[in-house]
């Protein structure tokens, strides 16, 4: 729970740094809370009368009276092409919030590092296993891969127990590789580990499945994106 408390404290601090925030306690959150949506922090958004709200279920636009919620993207169409203002703003939020979790990550560093990506992963996810099997292709492309835990079925699921055992292990790389290769591994899952905080962080980012890749600028790309395609995204 200490990690979860840290997450909530850091997110509030981050938003105070990014802008003059609209404080969550100024919103009428009755309707949101009734739907199980809890506000972590807010800041001005791109829609008049709405704020950008980081919640326990993702990032949304919420009306200032708390009665309406918008899930979607706002585009600036005054310039050549379409600029996704929502993803740009959300990316800045994710980028800042990730800084408090750097020491929790399982890192596979590229020898000739050009980029770092953070991947929310689940040991029981087939696409996560495929990405892990192909780690060398990312490392060879100069892409460092940093893992955070996201048990799709919750903390008490098989994946949740395995991920907790991974982050409790002395050799986390050996543990996560064993689970992803579906090999036998005995580990302790009852230590003080950060998996609950990772899971809460991922949900606040809008992660719903794994793998979910966070680029250096905070953009979120779902799925096991091949190294060549990921490199193309990173160069944008």
Image (tube, rainbow, N blue to C red):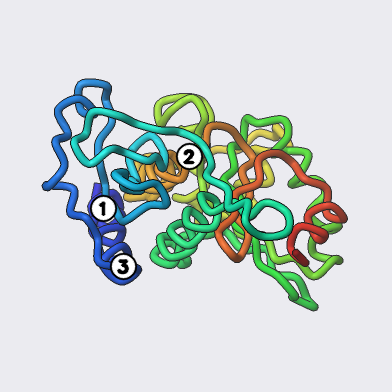
The one of 8 and 85 positioned closer to us in this rendering: 85
Whether residue 62 is situated above or below residue 105 in the rendered picture? above
Judged by depth in the image, the label closer to the viewer, 1 or 2, is: 2
Whether residue 214 is situated above or below residue 17 in the rendered picture? above
Labels 2 and 3: the sequence-earlier one: 3
Q: Can residue 191 be seen?
A: no
Q: Which numbered marker is on residue 8?
A: 1
Q: Quadrant of the C terminus?
A: bottom right
Q: Which numbered marker is on residue 55?
A: none
Identify the residue at the far top of this view: 34
Identify the residue at the far bottom of this view: 112
The one of 219 and 161 positioned closer to us in this rendering: 219
Identity of the residue drawn at 44% across and 50% down? 168
Say which residue label 3 marks.
19
Mark 3: secondary structure:
loop
Query: How far separated are the C-alphas under marks 1 and 3?
Result: 17 Å
Labels 1 and 3: the sequence-earlier one: 1
The one of 103 and 16 positioned closer to us in this rendering: 16
Residue 60 pos. (x, y %): 39, 39
Whether residue 182 is situated above or below residue 192 in the rendered picture? above
Q: Which numbered marker is on residue 206?
A: 2
Query: How far separated are the C-alphas under marks 2 and 3?
Result: 21 Å
């Amino acid at each position: 729970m200490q990690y979860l408390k840290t997450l909530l404290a850091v997110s509030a601090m981050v938003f105070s740094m990014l802008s003059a925030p609209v404080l969550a306690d100024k919103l009428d959150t009755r309707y949101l809370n009734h739907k199980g949506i809890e506000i972590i922090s807010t800041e001005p958004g791109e829609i008049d009368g709405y704020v950008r709200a980081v919640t326990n279920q993702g990032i949304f636009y919420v009306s200032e009276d708390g009665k309406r919620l918008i899930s979607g993207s706002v585009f600036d169409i005054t310039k050549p092409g379409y600029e996704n203002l929502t993803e740009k703003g959300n990316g800045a939020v994710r980028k800042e919030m990730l800084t408090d979790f750097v020491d929790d990550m399982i890192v596979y560093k590229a020898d000739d590092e050009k980029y770092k990506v953070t991947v929310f992963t689940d040991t029981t996810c087939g696409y996560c296993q495929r990405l892990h099997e192909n780690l060398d292709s990312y490392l060879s492309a100069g892409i460092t891969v940093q893992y955070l835990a996201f048990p799709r079925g919750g903390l008490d699921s098989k994946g949740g127990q395995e991920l907790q055992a991974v982050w409790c292990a002395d050799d986390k790389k050996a543990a996560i590789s064993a689970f992803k290769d579906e090999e036998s591994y005995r580990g302790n899952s009852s230590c003080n580990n950060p998996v609950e905080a990772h899971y809460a962080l991922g949900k606040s980012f809008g992660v719903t499945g794994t793998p979910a890749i966070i680029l250096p600028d905070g953009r979120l790309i779902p799925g096991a994106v091949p190294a060549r395609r990921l490199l193309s995204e990173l160069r944008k």
